[in-house]
Amino acid sequence: MAVQPVVYGSSDRPPRGNYAIAADDYTCDQDWGAISVEQHALFERLFQRQIRQMPGHACDEFIHALARLGMETRIPRFEEISRKLRRATGWEIVAVPGLIPERPFFSLLANRRFPVTVWLREPHEFDYIVEPDVFHDLFGHVPLLFNPVFADYMQAFGAGGLKAEGLNALEYLARLYWYTVEFGLLTTRDGLRVYGAGILSSGGETVHALTSDTPQRLGFDLERVMRTPYRIDDYQDTYFVIRSFAQLFDATAPDFTQLYTRVAALDTLPLNARLRGELTYSPNPLDPDATTGDQS
Ligand code: PHE
Ligand code: FE
């Protein structure tokens, strides 16, 4: 089943979660002691399914960091994760009740604080969930915060979000987030690898993103990304491929003000558009031993 979480709130339903417990900056207490044995066990099952798919699919940076986190068998205490992160890159994670509005989201990122949802999906949502839960946030997002370049990119993104709000450009920045932080691919000596959290925490998309003939895989181009809408209801039609986190950081470092004006004047592209002369990547060859997950 293809399932993707929305990034930050733009849905028409109220977000899931108990917002009464949140402070003004939307952070709250994790209340680790209240987590049930069943919830820890469900988290463990989700973790074990995903980790099996990581070799040959996730980028090395992700795999190495995941091994340091110690969350194989239970929902970890956020404070434990933060202690390791602070030492590595100066980031920490903070608990939030669920999806939070853009401004507090960007402010947290700009201060090197990554918001992690406190609730876990229900057992019947094992494969499919529409909003990010604690599993998606921890498994998908936290490992790359150990990478110094990616960690700096996330902070710059937060600062850029606060600025984009004033320039009416949040939609473009949301696309950049989607096609990098959530659904990004990386090319390596060993072929394509995934670094996007929305893919890595999904039961089926990890294999699909790398090996299916259906989607197109384009070389990362900032303006192109900002013109490309995305779907939240199925696997992606287009993925963008970076060569390194440094390329991503450098490409996004310049002031976006002019770029936003340019993009606003251009048409939004159809989901599967192919422009003339675009760099494309072929899928990885199918690994006969690979776990295919649930491919619908
Ligand atoms: N350079 C961007 C700007 O001027 C900020 C940014 C950096 C946004 C990295 C996203 C990612 O707005
Ligand atoms: Fe996410």
Image: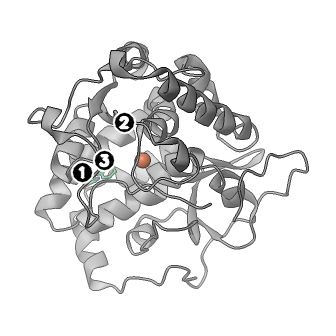
- Which is more foreground, mark 2 or mark 1? 2
The residue under label 1 is which amino acid type? Gly
Q: Which residue is mark 2?
A: 119
- Residues tagged 3 and 1 counted as in contact (Cβ below 8 A): yes
Direction from residue 243 to residue 125 in the image, left or right: left
Q: Secondary structure at mark 3?
A: helix
Residue at (38%, 42%) from the top-left corner? 153
Q: Residues within 10 Å of mark 2 (few under 14, many from 20)?
A: many
Residue 45 falls in image quadrant: top right
Percent x, y of residue 49: 68, 37
Q: Which amino acid type is shown beneath numbered disc 3?
A: Phe
Residue 30 in the figure: left or right of residue 183:
left
Residue under pointer 1? 160
- Residue in the foreground of this view, choosing between 135 and 18: 18
User: How far apart are the alpha carbons under marks 2 and 1?
Assistant: 28 Å
Q: CA distance from mark 3 to mark 1?
A: 5 Å
The label number, if any, that marks residue 157 in the structure image: 3
